Image: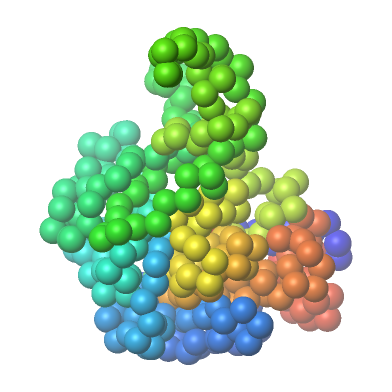
Amino acid sequence: MKNHELPRLDKHIKLHNYLLKYCRLSNGEIWTDKQSGHKIGCLDAAEPKDIKKLMARKKASLAVHDPPYNLVMFQIHEVKSFIDWCRKWMHNTNTALAENSSLYIWLGADQNNGFQPLPDFMIMMRDFPFTTRSFITMRNQRGYGTQNNWMAVRQELLYYTKGKHVFNINAEYTDIPKILRGYYKEVNGKVTENLERSKSENIRAGNVWVDIQQVFYRMEENVNGCYAQKPLKSAERIIRASSNENDIVIDFFCHSGSTLMASELNKRKCYTIDSDPLYCEIAIRRLEHYRKTGETGWQNSNPFEKEILKDKKLQRIINY
Ligand SMILES: C[S@@+](CC[C@H](N)C(=O)[O-])C[C@H]1O[C@@H](n2cnc3c(N)ncnc32)[C@H](O)[C@@H]1O
């Protein structure tokens, strides 16, 4: 059964619902990791009592959120309903974050529809006590809309802070060597070039990230069945720059567990939730799989490989 992919679990509803019987968590439950202190909850980001339960009086130093923004789940609503919903989980985020903390939010802009919801979200954020810090763009390799438009290859990431935030500047260098020369500047009476002045041979990440590979099925970190997985490298960059070891990092939209994995790899504690028990289970399994094999995903398999081998009905549903 190796080398088999799971279909997208948001598209294959029958499979999604069948797999629920293999999930450890039901709505309202939290799994606590004994080894590193992570928590994974089957909870609702917009529900204050759920977040209170997750945090149990602790405060996080960093939040990394990637809400569903394709508006599919808001099909019949307009952007206003989406923003009203965002306001709820943002309120919960504000409560869960410490006085001195950082917040990153991945959010798209629909170029065919008023660039929504990005500008609406940015305006809504002005009602919260956060300072705007940066607007980061990550470049995708694959794009769309190439026939009579610029190919759409960007993902937008908003960066806010509260109080005296952490920023570890050394975490922020890319693997890209510096090649451009120039920018002469006088330092202590001597004219120097930028390469002489720099601390690293490589370029800093800046607010345009072109060095991060989009996740695809040939990569070790790929989690079959998931449809919105963010690259571990992006999660690690955020976590290393904006938190310290042993800090609590929250992510209210866990899905494949990228923030969880990046926290594990960088010795942070991750408190993460998903309203869907199936993604909670996938994230728990991803962590367990990493600890057992050292692999960050399932390039040649999937999180339910064992069950698929044994369960004939499951094999029929997937069509193996
Ligand atoms: C865009 S995905 C997050 C992707 C994630 N960053 C990753 O790298 O895998 C959004 C996730 O939010 C979850 N979700 C949707 N509504 C939610 C809610 N009200 N509370 C918690 N999770 C929710 C969905 O089930 C989905 O798994």
Query: Which quadrant holds the N terminus?
Result: bottom right
Pick whichever, 70 or 89, lies toward us. Answer: 89
Q: Quick check: 318 above or below 136?
A: below
Residue 135, located in which quarter of the rendered image? top left
- 222 lies left or right of 69: right
Residue at horizontal 54 percent and vertical 47 percent from the top: 171
Query: Which quadrant holds the C terminus?
Result: bottom right
- 11 lies left or right of 164: right
Pick whichever, 219 or 103, lies toward us. Answer: 103
Q: Quick check: 289 above or below 144?
A: below
Residue at horizontal 56 percent and vertical 20 percent from the top: 196
Pick whichever, 43 or 7, lies toward us. Answer: 43
- 315 lies left or right of 116: right
Pick whichever, 292 or 312, lies toward us. Answer: 292
Q: Position of residue 221 (x, y in %)?
A: 69, 55
Residue at horizontal 42 percent and vertical 51 percent from the top: 167
- The tally of labels here is 0
Q: How is the image coloured?
A: rainbow
Is residue 71 among what the camera can see? Answer: no
Q: Position of residue 79 (x, y in %)?
A: 22, 52
Which residue is farthest left?
127
Q: Position of residue 51 (x, y in %)?
A: 34, 80
Residue at horizontal 48 percent and vertical 70 percent from the top: 247
Is residue 41 among what the camera can see? Answer: yes
